[in-house]
Amino acid sequence: MKILVVGGGGREHALVWKLAQSPLAEEIYCAPGNAGIADLAECVNIPAEDVDTLLEFARAEEIGLTVVGPEAPLAAGIVDKFTAAGLKIFGPSQAAALIEGSKALAKEIMEKYNIPTAAYASFTDRAAAEEYIRTQGAPIVVKADGLAAGKGVVVAMTEQEALDAVADMLSGNAFGSAGARVVIEEYLEGEEVSVLAFSDGKTVLPMVSAQDHKRVFDGDEGPNTGGMGAYSPAPVYTEELAEQTLHLVLQPAVDGMLAEGREYKGVLYAGLMVTPRGLKVLEFNARFGDPETQAVLMRLESDLVEIMLAVVDGRLDECTLKWSDDAAVCVVVASGGYPGKYEKGQPISGLDVEYPDTVVFHAGTKFVDQQVVANGGRVLGVTAHGATIAQAIEKAYAAVDGIHYEGCFSRRDIGYRALQREAK
Ligand code: AMP
Ligand code: GLY
């Protein structure tokens, strides 16, 4: 079967890498892909958001399965259009993807279906929002309702910060229309875990847990990024928490979405906070996480094409997921200045070396005259597996140390929380 993967980051490289291992995959295309993906798939120069051209391409090439990486095409209704054209596509419909696209909707669903989450209120009126902040006090969290590329959340340690964030968002200065509504919620303390699950609209199959590192600098300092690294499993996530996540979070969310006329197919990503008062949902995403996917898929032993077809056809109840006992760690190599301004076009060295038990997933690269150059903020996701998190970390950093381009940097402490737990 011919497969098309939509997107061109580290997540999509990991998806292509895993899909290519399936005997069902005859040919893989990736739009737009990147220099690393080009080793495994034919890259097609169509932007991930250009749904109509993607549809034309999928029709012309008789693509048997399309897999969507990023949220933008989902929000633009790519799944609805492909499905209407009789093409198989893995991902939620536009109406279902709104669980990520509208934080207000996500909170309503959680409230209605008793899914544990932070107390909240949502506002379009600035005076009302300010009043709420003054009565609740700080710390408090302000979130833009719409898609803001992971940057629409302000964890305010003072009332003034929260008031400023509200003013910024509701004035439309930050995030435009995505900030026209804000959700203000209770500040939660604890350890974060990401849990991704396959859903065919009824049956939910959770994947192994992962932990992301959102801040740019070691020790969780500096501004939020798309993610500087991830590891799997997250030792904080016990069997008991996994049971609770399935029965109190994932299944009720999928059942609730069905009841709301928003049948949820694809990957549902729950961002969880393990607090002293139990598990709480921070957010839902309608897609695979990046860089969590790089670590999680490295551990998947089952055939990903088979699973995705079962999701699309609504027969996930026939599937089980098999996982490696190894741990996996992904260290992101980023460009100086990220998540702010950064340079592009620097040649990358050290990519032609084989690093043991390691895959160097490309996130933002391209070819210029046969040379791989940096082409983004997050450039590589160096991912390794080992018997323990400590071993996986060691292998990943050995490879990171062999790779270089001008201005590159990584966090040096990916997995530190897991190491502290392994040490205990
Ligand atoms: P979100 O996009 O909603 O996951 O928020 C981005 C990040 O902000 C999360 O990964 C958390 O680190 C932090 N965050 C979000 N909501 C809360 C909350 N209610 N309490 C504390 N931190 C939060
Ligand atoms: N790594 C966080 C996300 O994909 O949203």
Image (cartoon, grey):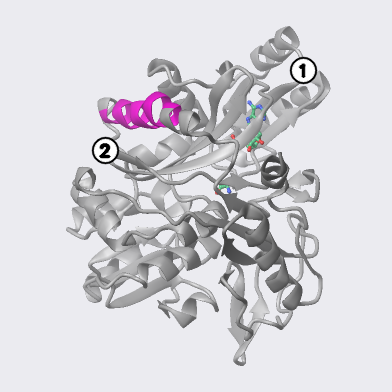
Q: Position of residue 144 (x, y in %)?
A: 60, 33
At x 54%, y 64%, the residue is 9
Q: Position of residue 64 (x, y in %)?
A: 22, 67
Residue picked out by circle 2: 203
* Residue 377, visible in the rendered structure: no
What residue would you read off at disc 1? 138
Q: Is residue 83 left or right of residue 264?
A: left
- Horizontal and vertical percent for residue 87? 21, 60
Extreme residue toward the top, this view: 135
The residue type indicated by label 1 comes to Ala
Quadrant in which the C terminus appears:
top right
Residue 209 appearing in the image: yes
Spatial CA distance of label 1 from label 2 is: 40 Å
Magenta: main secondary structure: helix
**Residue 110: quarter of image:** top left
Q: Secondary structure at mark 2?
A: loop
